[in-house]
Amino acid sequence: MVNIGQIIKEELDRQERTVSWMARKLNCTRAAVYRIFAKNSIDTQLLFNISQILQRDFFKELSNDVQEKGRMNNDTQVYH
């Protein structure tokens, strides 16, 4: 499964934005942003807000991961 917090952190780094910048955009503390980075899952409204702030569709990436996992599971099933 995709670690969404890590992906968000990587995107923030890629854009050369700071944790303080993101905290201001989300109207939260820097500590809260670091907690987001540590999450394996995230509230959909928060992910929507982060997607808008960073202008990246994180939902699509999660969806792609689900589809990929589904294909892998179908390939490994044993039929009798």
Image (cartoon, helix red, strand yellow):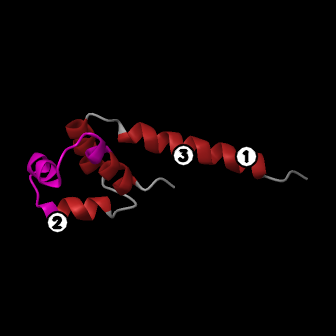
| Magenta: main secondary structure | helix
CA neighbours of label 1 inside 10 A, class few (<14), some (14 to 19), many (20+): few
Q: Nearer the viewer, residue 7 or 41?
A: 7
Sort mark 3 into few (<14), some (14-19) or many (20+) by Cα contacts within 10 Å. some
Residue indicated by mark 2: 31
Residue for point 91% across, 53% down: 80
Relative to 3, residue 15 above or below: above
- The quadrant where residue 32 appears: bottom left
Which badge, 3 or 2, comes first in the chain's sequence? 2
Question: How far is the residue under mark 1 from the one under mark 2?
Answer: 41 Å
Residue 15: image location, x then y, percent:
25, 39
Mark 3 — residue?
Answer: 66
Q: Who comes first in sequence, dot 1 or dot 3?
A: 3
- Residue that mark 1 sits on: 74
Query: Whole-Å distance between the Cαs marked 1 and 3?
Result: 12 Å
Q: Is residue 31 left or right of residue 68?
A: left
Q: Which residues, given as a range, are shown in magenta? A: 11-31
Question: Label 1 sits on what residue type?
Answer: Asn
Could you tell me which secondary element the residue under label 2 belongs to?
Answer: helix
Q: Residue at x 17, y 54 (%)?
A: 19
Mark 1 or 2, closer to the camera: 2
In the image, 33: left or right of 62?
left
